[in-house]
Amino acid sequence: MAEAQCKISFKIDYTSSSPIEKATAYYGIMGHSPAEYQIPDPESNKLVELPIIQAPGNYDLTVKLDLGNVSAQDTSSFKIGKCIPSSCKVPSIDRVLVDKFGQVEVYFSGDDTDLATLEYQIALDPEFKNIIYSKVGLTYAWPEYVDMNTGKINNNTLLYIRARKYCLSNGVSDWSGPVEFQSGEWKIQEAPYSVKNACCVSASFKEPTNPSDVGESICQSASRWTKSLNLTTPFPQIGSFIYLEGGRTPAIPGNLSDFDENGATGFNENGILWVRFPSYSNSKVYDVKRETGEIIGESLRYIC
């Protein structure tokens, strides 16, 4: 039988002339690292449901609101006990790959019907008594790139990974069976070259029949497509890797949640498809390998 599950909900009591641009809930058993949940379409007095919680205990809940250049937060507590049982289906881990730089890639499979989110854990032992990395808030839509810069994943180490599914209507699944894999040698890559006001289009963009119709998104510097990036080379070129501002986080699916704002969508799920750097060339558009954030060529289809 699957583990028990609890549904926790709350409302944001907020009054201000400034709209809520972003809201984040942090929750966890007191004394433990909290889980993070990005609240979709936040607004005052709207019911917010957290992802399903399994473990009983005393929880801390902090809700942070971002209002442009101002932020506000409030903390409260709640307690849960035994909840109703769950029959949510268990996901599976198809394979775990380690690339030449030591980046760990995880490929999930399963039924995405009724899917709220997936969670996975990486441990030093198959019993998961020594967990070194965990994440909640992903789907089957792309390979999961483990955050190697902040994770505690040692080089050349035998590791174990497992996953479970959070369902929209019927709780949380059991954990999948552990999958064994060997980590490689993580070669930290850095992108020291900052580029302001680059124009990006996500890979979820539906390519128009008429090439001129793409101009609104890649050829015009609309605010929702304009991003600050870092490159591994002093100027944009084929073979450059795109990183987030700061130069330590690759601009790949799973790392781009902050790009999905002001009407821009699909970055975090599907990655960057095209990029333009007006400070270097106002007309040149580059194709990007969305899985790695690498510039792979000058676009033959689009010129601004």
Image (cartoon, grey):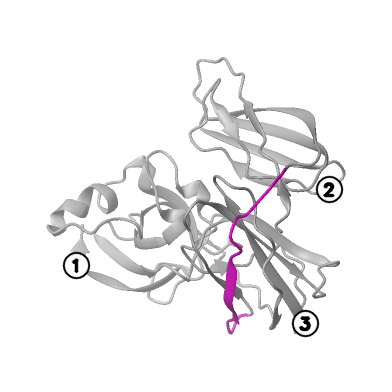
Name the residue located 81 percent from the left edge and 74 percent from the top edge. 124
Magenta-span inclusion, residue 86 = yes
Q: Which residue is mark 1?
A: 301
Label 3 sits on what residue type? Thr
Q: Decide: marks 3, 1 in contact (CB < 8 A)?
A: no
Q: Does label 2 or label 1 sit earlier along the sequence?
A: 2
Looking at this view, is 9 or 198 the one in front? 9
Q: Which residue is mark 3?
A: 157
Q: Which residue is mark 2?
A: 32
Residue 43 shows up from this direction: yes
The answer to whether 23 is drawn above or below residue 244 in the figure is: above
Label 2 sits on what residue type? His
Whole-percent x and y of residue 49? 60, 35
Q: Quadrant of the C terminus?
A: bottom left
Helix, strand or loop status at disc 3: loop
Name the residue located 59 percent from the left edge and 47 percent from the top edge. 170
Helix, strand or loop status at disc 1: strand
The answer to whether 44 is drawn above or below residue 269 in the figure is: above
Apparent side of residue 297 relative to residue 94 in the rendered image (left or right): left
Q: Residues within 10 Å of mark 3 (few under 14, many from 20)?
A: few
Q: Decide: marks 3, 2 in contact (CB < 8 A)?
A: no
Q: Which residues are magenta?
A: 84-101
Looking at this view, is 60 or 231 the one in front? 60
Residue 164's mark?
none
